[in-house]
Every structure is written in C-alpha cells, then in structure tokens.
Image: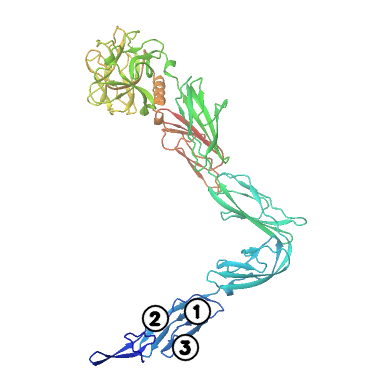
Amino acid sequence: IGDTTQTLVVTQPGMYWVEGTDTFGYKSIDTIHVSFYVNSLIDTNLPFLCAGDTLLWDVPLDTSLYSFLWSDSSTDSTLQIYQAGTYSVVVTDTGGCAFYSDTNIVFIDSFPLTASLGPDDSICLGNSIGLTQGVAQADTYLWCNGLTTPEILPSTTGIYCLTATDTNGCIAEDSVLITVKGEAPTANFSMDTTCFGEISSFTDLSTVPFPYNIVNWTWDFGDGNSSTATDPSHYYDSVGVYNVSLSVTTDSGCFGDTIISIDIHPLPMAGFSPLITYVNYEMQFIDETSISNDSIISWTWVIDNLDTLYGDTPTYEFASTGIHDVYLLAVTNFGCSDSILQALTINSSPDYINGLQFWLRSDSVELVGSDTVSVLYDLSGNGYDAFQNGAVSRPIFRSSEPNINNHPAIVFDGSNDYMEGDTGLLGGITDFSFVIVCRINQIGSNWIYGNCPNGNLASFQFTGDIAAKFRFWPQGSSSSSFFSTSHVVNEYYIVSLVHSNDSIPQTRMKQGGFAAGSGNLDVNTHTDEGYVLGKFPAGSNYLNGEIIEVLLYDRFLDYNELYQVENYLRYRYFPLLYQEPVDLGPDILVSKGCDTLLDAGDRYEDYFWNTGDTTQTLVVTQPGMYWVEGTDTFGYKSIDTIH
C-alpha cells in the first residue's frame, strides 16, 4: 500500500505483504491475511419492542467488505423489526469467513395497546378515575392537567387525557369523556364488639350531601360472608384480623366505599389457685388466667356471693371450715372476659383439732448468730419447746427452701446435732397421732424422733433406715416395722403415725406413696416428760436430714381429722402437688347446631354433672348452663361452670 515504515496499522481485512532489505542488500518478502472478529460488533441484546414501534438492528460494518444474510433472507446491514419473533444474522467477509450471531428473541410490550381509561363514563363528584387496564404495568403518569398521580378526581364535565409509561419505557395514551352527575357519599361504619364468641354488630355511619340519600349498602365481612343490610350483625368463627369493606350507593347512582381492619380478640381462660386454704388464716389467691397476645387488666372476685375482692392476688380469711364458693371474673384490655366458679374446701388448721400436745415448725425458732437454732418453739400454746444449749450440737437454720414452697428448714448434720424437750405431760400417752414433715439427706440409721427424754428407750421411735425406708419402733428399740414404700434421698415427705390401744397402729406416707400398717404390737409409752429430735435417745445415732414441722396429738385422730392435718401440710409445703381445678374452658357458641362434647379432664376419681351424669365427659345437645364437680384421690373437690 506504499508505506515504508517498520509497522503498519491495519483498519480493513484483506491480504497484506511487506518487503525488507538488509544492510547487505538482501531482500525478503512475507504475506499475511487479516480478518476481524465480527461477533463483537453484532449487538444481540435487543430491547423490548413497544407495540406500534419499529426496532432497528444495525451491524456497523462496511458493506463493501462484508455481506449479510438475515433470518428473514434480507441482505442489508440493518434489519427493521416490527413484530415478535426470533432473529439472527450471518456476516461473511471478503475472505469467505462467516460469523453467526446469537439468536435474538424479540418480545412485544403490548402496554401501548392495552392500557385504557375505559369507556366514557358518568361519575360522582368525589369519585376518582384512572387506568382500568394496564394498572400493574404502569410506572409513571402524566395527565393533561399536569398531575402525575395514578388517579385524579374530576370536578367538572369534560375530556380527561393521560400519558402513561411502563417500566420498559413504552408509552400509552388515552382519553375519556367524564360527565359529573352528582356527589359521592362518604362511606364509614363502626362495630360494637371485638371479642370472640360474641355477635358483632355493625353500624353504618356513611354520609351524603343534601338532597341525596343512600339507598344501597354492600358489606364484605372479610371472611367470605357478606350482607346488604343497613346495620348488619355477624358472627366470626375464629380469632384474627379481618378487613371489612362497606360500599354505599345514593339515589343518584353515586357510590363510596371504605375498608376498615377489625381485630377479633381471644377470650381469656379464667383460672386461679389458692395458697393455704385453712380456717382463720389469711390466704392469698393467685390469678392463673391465660390469654394470648392481649393482657388482663381487671379481676373481680366474689366469695360465697357475699364479699367482693379486686386485683390479681387478693387475700381473704375464711371464718369457717367447709365448702366455699369463689368466683373470678377476668377482663382483658379489650373488654373480653371469662369467669370461673370454684368450690374450695377450707380445712381446720392443726390447733383447731382437739388434743394437740405440741406443734413445732421451722419458722418459729430462736437463733444464735445468723443460722444456728437454740430453741424451736411450740405453737400449740402448751410450752413444749425443743432446745439445744450446746453450741456444737445445734442444727442449722436454712431460711428458704424452694422444694417446700420457700419455707425454712432445720438441718441436722448427722454427727451430733439434736434438740430435746424436757417439759410437759408427754409421758404416759397411750392413744396418739403423730405427723411430721421431714427429709433424709443420706441413707443410714437416721433417728428422726423419739417420744421419750434423752437417755430413755421406753417409748415409740420414728427413724430412717439403711434400707431406704422409714421405720417405726413401737417399743423403744426392741422391735420395729418398716414402711412398705421406700423413700428417696433429698425428697420431703409427710408421714403420719396414729395409734390406739384397741387398734393396730397405722402409718401413712405422702408424696412418696402410701405405706403399709406398722404391725400389731402395742406401743410402749413412758412416764417421764420429754422428747428428742434428730438423735437416738439412748445412743449415738443421729439424723442426717431435715425437720420442717412436727405435730403430736394425745388421741387417735379419725380419718377426716387426719386428712385435715395432712391437707394443711400439703397446702403449706407442696401447693403444686394439688390437682389443678376442673377447667371446662371458655363459654361455647355453636353456630351450626351440632352436639358439643364437654370434658372435665382425667385428673379426678369421681365426677358429678348438674345433669346427674357421673362420667368424665358429657355430650351437650341443648343450650344452657352446665357445671361439673370433680373429686381427686385426696378428696379435694373442684367445680367449673360453662355456658
């Protein structure tokens, strides 16, 4: 091409040669064929084709050096595309090299054809207009009056036009003749309840200017049900949020609508538990009402239809034993409520039963320092206190023990801790009832109680044995009977021993099961006054464990009396071991008229319904109030009522 430089910039494909001459005059020639990679010049990323537009696919190559063959058989360097389809091109250079483009699929965006304001219409002042088709594709709006909102509110009769653009940049234009024929009503309503199980009443609050009147109402309750009443009522069969819509139409044909979300709130499930239910003691009620999401803000308690209490943990003192009715009404922050009626058995406290000789309890002590017990006071009023004057033999006072309802415990170390009482008329008892709350901390010969002065063997003893069983010695240490049920280390027990000269001594152990009778041996007693806690009176065996409460009566308590004492101890130390009260659940509204099964739960031994039925469950076929009384294995009764 005439250039005489060492290098040459090539801008066109073709054959190129060069001749070089060295310093000795020697000449040399070489030839090369140059081709360009054409695909890099062919753009196959074609955009969407807006309906009604033309898309130009241009390959920017010199037509004198390249030939073109398009998928529609045309041979120009450009292709005009009018419709959807697949398109490609083959480019061949002068050297015969062919380059094939990728196949390009062209889609038609139909937004310019489908977007529409709809047909000419007559509307009401306050009603809006906007796209009736193409709303989902539209991205920007420009009305003829300059507004850029998706909808506008026509105020006068006339032609309204819109230019809308979708996300592909395709433009649609439309216009519509709007005739303003009246004024639209303002739709609004209220509802008077939000609690599950109640009928929800809706009140129309829609307004319209004079002289127009609302003549039609269309309600959608958000659960698939609807109504055309002015002020309808509706029952929702589940808790939740519902979008309620109301559309109203006037006598001029104008309409207005609104959507309001309402929340159908759950009902609470009322429940409570009493702490310590015995006579002439201030007891506390603990609210156990359950509610999901919402909260309880009001508690009303009614005792025997006479006294009214308020709050979630009120206190009350019963003046008499027997069955007492306690009613609780619990109300949530949304006004939803539930109630429960429970029959409480109020028991005698130990000092209300005749014959109490002494009553020792771990919270009635005198301490030396912060935690050693020198005196364990007798609560019976008889003055039969237990004491320990020796500093090395004093048991330890633990102020709070979670396993006995956070009451204190008297801890004996198993080495030399013990206490004794040397006053009172405890000797010579032939009929007696002995009840104790205690714990064994280590298996061994644990001497818990001896009904005689220190150094004496003449009376009954109560121990824990290396066989992991409690043991009763009716005649000092000469013979004994084991309880049939083993005890567990570090567990607390209520143990009862009752005896009469004309009966076989009886023993009973609570919380670890029931024990067998102790045998048919008479119980020896003594004439000397006194008793020992935590030590073998005539030897060196001690208690490695704890004593919580001890009661001794100088007579044989009958079953009901003994049950009252044991029940007092169960309530005081093991309230969670009580059966939960009968709970029939919240009141039931059966919308379909189907039979309903009421279930009192399987925790009780006996059941009694107000219908006379005595089964755990009751099939209800008629509306009304139903109640059931359940009695557990300990004779504890509970009542619940349901509507």
Question: In the figure, 346 relative to 377: above or below?
Answer: below
Q: Position of residue 610 (x, y in %)?
A: 52, 34
Mark 2 surroundings: few (<14), some (14-19) or many (≥20) residues within 10 A: some
Report the Cα–Cα distance between label 1 and label 2.
Answer: 23 Å
Q: Earlier in the sequence, mark 3 or mark 1?
A: 3
Residue type at the position of mark 3: Asp
Residue type at the position of mark 1: Ala
Badge 1 marks a residue whose secondary structure is loop
Q: Residue at x 39, y 85 (%)?
A: 11
In the rendered image, which quarter is residue 405 located in? top left
Residue type at the position of mark 2: Asn
Q: Residue at x 43, y 82 (%)?
A: 88
Q: Position of residue 24 (x, y in %)?
A: 22, 91
According to the picture, the residue beneath numbered tag 3 turns out to be 76
According to the picture, the residue beneath numbered tag 1 turns out to be 84
Whether tag 2 and tag 3 are in contact, CB under 8 A, the answer is: no
The mark found on residue 39 in the picture is: 2
Instruction: Decide if residue 124 is on the left or right side of residue 480.
Output: right
Closer to the camera: disc 3 or disc 1? 3
Q: Position of residue 202 (x, y in %)?
A: 64, 49
Closer to the camera: disc 1 or disc 2? 2
Q: Earlier in the sequence, mark 2 or mark 3?
A: 2
Badge 3 marks a residue whose secondary structure is loop
Counting every numbered tag in the picture gives 3
Badge 2 marks a residue whose secondary structure is helix
